[in-house]
Amino acid sequence: MAVVHDPYEEAKKQLRQTIDLLGLSEEIYEILAVPERLVQVRLPVKMDDGTVKVFIGWRSQHNSALGPYKGGVRYHPETNVNEVIALSMWMTWKNSLAGLPYGGGKGGIRVDPHKLSPGELERLSKAYFEAISDIVGVDQDIPAPDVYTNPQTMAWFFDQYSRIKRGQYFGVVTGKPVELGGMETRIIATGFGTAVAAREVANKLWGGVAGKTVAVQGYGNAGYYAAKFLHEMGAKVIAVSDSRGGIYNPEGLDPDDVKKVKNETGSVINYPKAVKKLTNEEILELEVDILVPAAIENVITEENADKIKAKAIVEAANGPTTPEAEEILTKKGIVVVPDILANAGGVIMSHIEWVNNRMGGWITEEEAKTRLEQKMVNNFLKVWDYWQNKLDTTKYNMRAAAYAIAVDRVVRAMKLRGWI
């Protein structure tokens, strides 16, 4: 029987390891292990057939020492309260590591959005945002898209909040449509940032990413754009997958062609130029230079870590590697670029959008993409330098370095504010 991992317990393990590494007190661990606020909401929604269905949603606000809470809202049938808390904690570290003036937050609704009509999704989205409207705001908590939410969802959030508060609060959410103060670069940001992180680790390990083989598990927004930009950088994407399975071609795949087939048929497995089909488990275990897990959390565990053959793992998903698996990967010498560094492109771009909203729209798309890339490169180099020069690299990996930098910044902010 497969081991079931609780993401909140995994997040606390990672925090505990960092507290011990930095020599911080038990008091600090206890403060950071629990969110500042956790809200559960009941959402009765009138369905198209006239019946009423009740959904459950959450918003976790983990830490605000560095600024307002920031993090996405996901719609998923398996979302639960512990997952939302864990994700909010990871957002605290991600925002801190990126040097953003944000704390960490996350939201979720337990729902399969594919089973709802557009009208039902709109009513659900507006009901959720109305339910949490008192605890979100431009300087309080700024949600964004996540799993199975998108710019349209953010437009519904923005509209409902503006109606309730009787104003035009463009900065209350990010990842909005361009017509409502969003930016086109936000759509590509997470995948583009992941590709930049992969390029930078390839530069360190091999002197460049050109010609290096890549496998991507998950072909949603982040996975597709990571594959697309790595392909454009000269890497060879030889395997990709989605929830229905994966495809493989040792000569390389064209990410745009694969995306077109997925859009037309519902899955990458229908791509005609694939040499063979693979399971999602087999995708993870391919012999490639770079593995990009871009689906869900806890896909690399102690049960399959020994089978991982990639030389570097660049985490586009949140929490795809368990602490137990990471110990095995570290001993094998596999470099893991952690999620809070690798997939931070989305929240970095969200910050740029948020600033742009507050400035009245002064930043161009070209400037935004340049700022995003510079931020990703600088953050990567900061973590790499800490890992190489301040830690025993045979004992600690890049996640330890990233967490040490992130947690230390939050703790210093809490001390300055008199919280501890």
Image: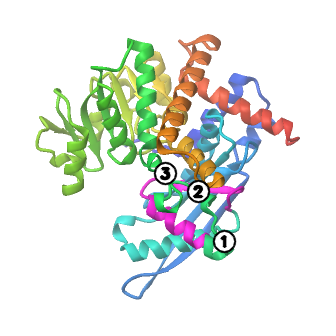
Looking at the rendering, in which quadrant would you find the C terminus? top right
Is residue 247 in the magenta section?
A: no
Count residues near mark 1 (Cα–Cα under 10 Å), then give few for <14, some for 14-19, many for 20+.
few
The foreground one among 230 and 1 is: 230
First-in-chain label (2 vs 1) = 2
Q: According to the image, label 3 marks what residue?
A: 183
Q: Nearer the viewer, mark 2 or mark 3?
A: 3
Q: According to the image, label 1 marks what residue?
A: 167
- What's the CA distance linking mark 2 and mark 1? 18 Å
Give residue 121's position: percent from left, percent from top.
43, 71
Count residues near mark 3 (Cα–Cα under 10 Å), then give few for <14, some for 14-19, many for 20+.
many
Q: Is residue 278 left or right of residue 43?
A: left
Q: Secondary structure at mark 3?
A: loop
Determine whether label 3 and label 1 are within 8 Å by CB: no
Determine whether label 2 and label 3 are within 8 Å by CB: no
The amino acid beneath tag 3 is: Met
Q: Nearer the viewer, mark 2 or mark 1?
A: 1
Q: Secondary structure at mark 1?
A: loop
Q: Which residues are magenta?
A: 136-161
The amino acid beneath tag 1 is: Gly
First-in-chain label (2 vs 3) = 2
